[in-house]
Image: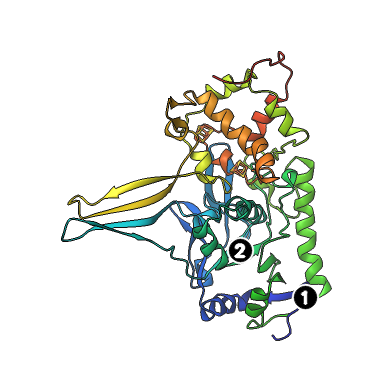
């Protein structure tokens, strides 16, 4: 279809969806999308529509993630898996320098440029787009620009999918980061019964859309998908997972259906003003300092550097790997480990995420994706911990040092 307008809504029938995958490949993108692997929905290479997790739902709660057959045959009614876009912009491990020993015993060092093939990612949710925009500020928003991130980011093509249902762990609405996709996409899809309403968000998106058998969406097609999205937004605003047209089968509710909210009013000052709240001890008695929450969080950006030698000493690789503020090494300075207790590490993570980021980057570090709740092995819940910190306590007159 020629003459695509950004801002207009088009319709892509489901039988024509393969054209989207083919068009992306023809334009030189490697296509990545949600797939089922290791009993979770994670991103992987996609060539055919049949590889999508069509008809699957993910049940999520604190410390719990299970896939099961959905009561519908919808294509994008699962929520979010453990991976986010940061796996593609800021990979868990990347080689940044290679050292090779020469015949004369000298070492030759070569900086490794990031591999950044044009990559189209399918099915990206509003919370993850919000996280990407936050990571843009972290990696690109100062004079210390991260060229590795920039190279990967520039070559991403993002096909967003508006959420059809929310897990009880989702609270993007209370963070103003979802569930409707509003930013950073090239194309956005909203699923209906037999097709998708398609919005185009960039010139790159228009170039792909021109190759597709799109028609202008009819009023009834737009109304159909908007009603479902409005019902989901209403559900998330109310803080309870009521029966809605967005999730029609109550028989599959698992008995723990309260929809989480995070009250952000005055949160920065609340956290900085409660460095010795007794609740830090309570949460530390449950926290394992495992760092899972930082690994799955789409905005966490800490890394460290490791030297990896070959056994015969002929080569050494310098690798940048994800790091977590829950490890003792993370706060190691000349005098030793600064944050020696789990109490101080959890407090550091939460206070930085929800308060320090606002000072550093002008925005909260949380987009409400709920991954840290789902993937915490003991089900620690960031929304519940903040609520507990709002409870009355003795006036904290210390400076919070330990
Ligand atoms: S802190 Fe938790 S809910 Fe917030 S963005 Fe990170 S993983 Fe998602
Ligand atoms: S809050 Fe949970 S996921 Fe995070 S370090 Fe503690 S036990 Fe691990």
Q: Residue at x 44, y 27 (%)?
A: 337
From the top left corner, tell me how far across and down residue 173 is, in percent.
74, 47
* Residue 28 to residue 347: above or below: below
Count all numbered tags in the image, as a single digit: 2
Kindly tell me whether residue 367 is visible in this rendering. yes
- Upstream in the sequence, badge 2 or badge 1? 2
Tag 1 secondary structure: loop
**Which quarter of the rendering shows the N terminus?**
bottom right
* Residue 140 to residue 357: above or below: below
Q: How is the image coloured?
A: rainbow
Distance Cα–Cα, label 2 vs label 1: 19 Å
Q: Look at mark 2 in the image and give the residue it sits on.
A: 75
In the drawing, what numbered circle is on residue 123? none
Q: In the shown orientation, is residue 312 left or right of residue 317?
A: left
Assign ligand 1 to one image quadrant. top right
Kindly tell me whether residue 256 is visible in this rendering. no
- Graded by Cα atoms within 10 Å as few (under 14), some (14 to 19) or many (20 or more), the crowding at tag 1 reads some
| Mark 1 residue CB less than 8 A from any atom of ligand 1 | no
Snapshot quadrant of residue 264: top right
- Graded by Cα atoms within 10 Å as few (under 14), some (14 to 19) or many (20 or more), the crowding at tag 2 reads many
Q: Residue at x 16, y 61 (%)?
A: 103
From the top left corner, tell me how far across and down residue 87 is, in percent.
50, 55
From the top left corner, tell me how far across and down residue 88 is, in percent.
50, 59
* Residue 291 to residue 221: above or below: above
Q: Look at mark 1 in the image and give the residue it sits on.
A: 217
From the top left corner, tell me how far across and down residue 252 is, in percent.
63, 47
Nearer mark to the viewer, of 2 and 1: 1
Snapshot quadrant of residue 272: top right
**Which quarter of the rendering shows the C terminus?**
top right
Q: Nearer the viewer, residue 130 or 148?
A: 148
Q: In the shown orientation, is residue 26 left or right of residue 238?
A: left
* Residue 21 to residue 342: above or below: below
């Amino acid at each position: 279809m020629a003459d695509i307008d950004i801002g207009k809504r088009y319709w892509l029938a489901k039988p024509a969806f393969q054209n989207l995958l083919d068009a992306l490949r023809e334009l030189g993108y490697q296509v990545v999308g949600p797939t089922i692997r290791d009993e979770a929905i994670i991103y992987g290479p996609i060539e055919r529509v049949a590889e999508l997790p069509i008809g699957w739902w993910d049940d999520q709660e604190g410390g719990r993630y299970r896939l099961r057959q959905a009561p519908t045959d919808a294509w994008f009614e699962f929520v979010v898996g453990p991976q986010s876009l940061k796996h593609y912009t800021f990979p868990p491990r990347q080689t940044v320098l290679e050292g090779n020993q020469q015949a004369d015993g000298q070492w030759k060092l070569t900086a490794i440029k990031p591999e950044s093939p044009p990559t189209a990612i399918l099915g990206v949710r509003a919370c993850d787009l919000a996280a990407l925009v936050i990571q843009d500020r972290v990696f690109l928003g100062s004079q210390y620009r991260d060229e590795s991130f920039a190279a990967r980011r520039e070559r991403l093509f993002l096909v967003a999918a508006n959420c059809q249902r929310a897990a009880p762990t989702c609270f993007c609405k209370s963070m103003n980061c979802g569930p409707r996709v509003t930013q950073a996409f090239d194309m956005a899809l909203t699923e209906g019964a037999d097709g998708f309403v398609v919005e185009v968000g960039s010139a790159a998106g228009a170039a792909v859309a021109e190759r597709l058998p799109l028609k202008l969406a009819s009023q009834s097609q737009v109304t159909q998908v908007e009603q479902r999205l409005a019902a989901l937004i209403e559900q998330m605003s109310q803080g309870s997972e009521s029966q809605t047209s967005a999730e029609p089968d109550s028989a599959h509710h698992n008995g723990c259906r309260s929809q989480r909210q995070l009250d952000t009013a005055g949160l920065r000052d609340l956290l900085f003003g409660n460095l010795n709240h007794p609740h830090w001890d309570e949460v530390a008695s449950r926290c394992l300092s495992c760092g899972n929450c930082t690994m799955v969080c789409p905005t966490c950006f800490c890394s460290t550097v490791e030297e990896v030698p070959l056994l015969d000493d002929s080569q050494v690789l310098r690798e940048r790997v994800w790091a977590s503020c829950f490890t003792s090494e993370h706060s190691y300075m000349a005098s030793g480990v600064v944050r020696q207790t789990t109490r101080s590490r959890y407090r550091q993570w939460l206070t930085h995420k929800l308060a320090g980021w606002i000072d550093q980057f002008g925005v909260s570090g949380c987009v409400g994706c709920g991954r840290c709740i789902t993937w915490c092995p003991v089900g620690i819940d960031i929304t519940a911990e903040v609520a507990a910190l709002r409870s009355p306590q003795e006036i904290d007159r210390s400076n919070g040092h330990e």
